[in-house]
Every structure is written in C-alpha cells, then in structure tokens.
Image: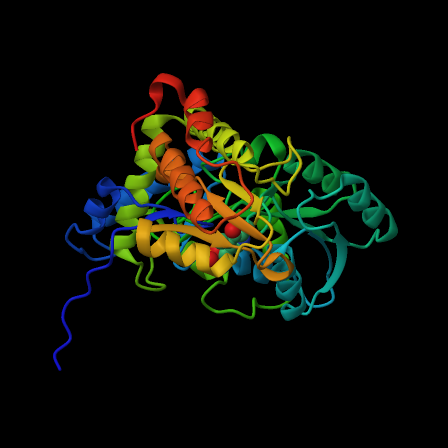
C-alpha cells in the first residue's frame, strides 16, 4: 500500500485551541524556508520582537517565542526562576494551575497551594493570607485565563499583592493574549508566557514569553545552572538577543515563525483594543443564543472569558455523541470538559480568527439542531435569532 499525501478535513475550530488559522497565516507558512542565521530571517525576528512587545504591552527586551508549545513557555518560566528549596505560591482554580505545581516540584521547589473552586477566579484574599503566612516565599504563579473552566482572574490585583510581599510573578497568558487585556508593564508582570494557537490564531508549536529586569536579575543571581539545557534563558538569550552576532543555539522552527509573524501583523493591523472588543462582542452574541436555548454558563457574569465559554450539558444528553455528531455532520469542533468537569460541560471557543459572527451563528444552529434531535430539554429554534439580535447588521447569514 502506498500512503498518499495527508489532506486534513476542513473544520471550524471552536474548542479550547487550536483555533481556526486564516488563509493569510497558512500562506505565510508555505513561504520558502531560509537559513535561521540568514540576515533576512534575523530581520524578520527583530520585527517579531516588536510585534510581541506590542501584544504583551511591554518594553521588555527579553520578549521572544520559545520554540515549542505553551507548555514549554510555562516550563521556561519555572526552570529559570525556581531554584531547589524555593517556596512558590501557586494559585489553582483549574487544570493549568495544577501543572504549575508539577513544574515547581520538578524544579525542586516547594509549592504552597492557594486553591479556589473550578469555575471561580483566584481569590486575592486567599493569596494575601498565603503571602502573610509564608514571608519566605519567592514567587507567585497563577493562570490569568483558565481555559479548563472559562474563568478570568484579576491579574493586576494578584501581581500587585505579590509585589507588596516582595515576590516575583509568573503569569500564564496562553489563552488571554490577544483576546482580553494583558498589560505586562503597567501591571508589573515579571515573567509571562503564552501560546500561538489560541487568540493569536497561528498554528501551535510556539510560546511567546517575556521577562522583565527583576526576573533577569533573579536569573543572573542563580546559585546553580538551570537543569534544562534547552530552556536555559542564559543560553537562549545569546540567540534571540544577539542582534547580528547571534550564536547558534538550536534551529528555529522557521516556517512556523513566519506564521506567527503574519498573525501578529494581523493583530497589529486590527489593533489590540479592537481585537479585545471583538472577542467581547461575539461572546455577548453567543451568550444570548446559549441562554435562549436554556443552557447555563458555569462561571458567574463578570468573571467569564469571552474567548472560552464553558456551558453546562443539558440533563440526559450524551456528551461524546453530541460532539461526534457536530464533528461529523457539521465539521465543527467544540471542547469537552477536563478533569472533574468531564461530561458536565462543553467548552466553546471564540478565539482569534474564529471569533466572528458567522461562527457564533453556525455553532448555535448546529447545537440547536443536534440537541433538538437528541430530544434534549432545550428551547428549540430560538438561539440563532437571539444571537442575531445582538449581532445586528454585522451578522452574516450562516
Ligand atoms: C493551552 C494552554 C496551555 C498549554 O499550551 P500548549 O500549547 O498546549 O502546550 C497552558 N495554559 C493554558 C491556560 C492553556 O490554555
């Protein structure tokens, strides 16, 4: 048997990521591969730094994409900033906070957990209690946008609290970057990481990170080498910050970087504020449809992520069957619940390029039809019109 070229089906990606990648970004990925030390490539990477600084709202010199997915950006922050014996306060309100704890432990650090119920935000009072009880803590880590539940914590307040008690901060902005406001310099975030496949709508495989001067001082003062060779920032810096004197560290994923560059140019052209407003607007439309149908959000209003809508699965409905039908009959992907939320919620993403009026209507129409057929206890045939009332004239027929 001869294997033929792979032709992926055309899907609409409305899960927790990856999100739909535009033809413009796909086109950029297909441009000719050049050497990673080619002056033309180095020039592109210099632009990339400026574009990422804009997306993060920072002047941090050490702002670059780690050559691996969001999880590697997470690991880059922890392995560089945590030394054996360091106490790290980790706020957990979903799946990704749990991974932060794993990272601290694997660095030989001591995690102090501040736990909040899944679907709620990180409670600043609990963080302050933990900071008071642990005056020797060195770091505070939390997830800004918890993709497993759709809750958005108040990053500005949490960072200010950490600084009040002389702790540096590590912030997970994988799902928030490009979707909801992140202001690295204004909020004083010390180390931050994100991903490309959520609200930036580039393919997965890169993790934009940014470190401020305080974080770099901490890294320079380390007593021992970072245990990861690949993620050791003191080595990576020679490559990303070397200007024309860039030294070989690893071969950058060249074409994937073209894709991220294009996605960031698109973000720059739209404008960050406009991108945030678009995500908020399309969320309002989806919410109107979801609630008209009778489904409920698990996160309380005001704490919800517009780009990740976690809704309850109606009584008696088979989670997997519905998602399979959506995929097979509508080419539509939505997300399942993670961990303790499995089988209880769906996660509907409206991220980046996928956050548009057409997708809102298409998803509501598909859910309405599939749930009606499954005899689910919902209000039938009303969701799309409820969304249209919000979308108004900007709505396109689905
Ligand atoms: C997706 C995600 C990650 C992990 O990113 P990968 O690119 O899958 O490694 C980390 N944190 C949050 C909040 C995420 O949503």
Asked which quadrant contains residue 282, the reply is top left
- In the image, 95 versus 202, the foreground residue is 95
- The residue shown at (54%, 61%) is 75
Q: Exactly how many numbered labels are in the figure?
A: 0
Asked which quadrant contains residue 96, the reply is bottom right
Residue 122 percent coordinates (x, y): 71, 44
Residue 181 percent coordinates (x, y): 53, 32
Residue 154 percent coordinates (x, y): 66, 36
- In the image, 114 versus 305, the foreground residue is 305
Asked which quadrant contains residue 27, the reply is top left
The answer to whether 267 appears left or right of 305 in the picture is left
Does residue 216 show up? yes
Residue 253 percent coordinates (x, y): 30, 58
Q: Residue furthest bottom?
A: 1
The answer to whether 39 appears left or right of 304 in the picture is left
Does residue 239 show up? no
The answer to whether 75 appears left or right of 396 in the picture is right
Q: Residue furthest right?
A: 133
- The residue shown at (87%, 51%) is 133
């Amino acid at each position: 048997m001869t294997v033929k070229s792979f032709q992926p089906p055309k899907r609409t990606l409305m899960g927790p990521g990856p999100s739909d990648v535009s033809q413009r970004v796909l086109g950029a990925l297909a441009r000719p591969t050049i050497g990673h030390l080619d002056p033309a490539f180095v020039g592109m990477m210099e632009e990339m730094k400026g574009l990422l600084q804009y997306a993060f709202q920072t002047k941090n010199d050490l702002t670059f994409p780690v050559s691996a997915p969001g999880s590697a950006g997470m690991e880059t922050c922890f392995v560089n900033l945590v030394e054996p014996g360091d106490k790290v306060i980790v706020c957990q309100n979903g799946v990704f906070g749990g991974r932060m704890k794993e990272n601290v432990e694997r660095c030989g650090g001591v995690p102090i957990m501040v736990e909040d119920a899944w679907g709620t935000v990180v409670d600043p009072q609990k963080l302050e209690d933990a900071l008071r009880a642990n005056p020797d803590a060195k770091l505070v880590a939390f997830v800004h946008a918890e993709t497993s539940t759709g809750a958005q914590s108040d990053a500005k307040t949490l960072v200010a609290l950490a600084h009040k008690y002389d702790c540096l901060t590590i912030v997970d902005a994988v799902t928030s970057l490009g979707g909801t406001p992140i202001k690295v310099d204004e909020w004083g975030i010390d180390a931050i990481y994100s991903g490309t496949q959520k609200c930036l709508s580039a393919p997965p495989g890169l993790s934009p990170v940014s470190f401020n001067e305080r974080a770099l001082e901490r890294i320079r003062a380390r007593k021992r080498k970072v245990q990861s060779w690949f993620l050791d920032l003191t080595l990576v810096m020679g490559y990303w910050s070397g200007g024309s004197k860039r030294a070989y560290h690893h071969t950058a994923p060249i074409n994937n970087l073209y894709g991220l560059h294009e996605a960031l140019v698109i973000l720059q052209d739209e404008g960050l504020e406009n991108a945030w407003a678009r995500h908020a607007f399309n969320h309002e439309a989806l919410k109107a449809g979801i609630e008209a149908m009778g489904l409920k959000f698990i996160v309380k209003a005001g704490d919800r992520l517009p780009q990740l809508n976690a809704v309850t699965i109606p009584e008696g409905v088979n989670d997997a069957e519905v998602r399979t039908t959506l995929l097979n009959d509508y080419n539509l992907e939505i997300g399942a619940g993670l961990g303790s939320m499995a089988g209880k919620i769906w996660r509907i993403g409206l991220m980046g390029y996928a956050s548009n009026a057409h997708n809102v209507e298409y998803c509501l129409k598909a859910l309405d039809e599939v749930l009606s057929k499954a005899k689910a206890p919902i209000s039938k045939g009303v969701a799309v019109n409820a969304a249209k009332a919000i979308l108004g004239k900007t709505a396109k027929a689905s």
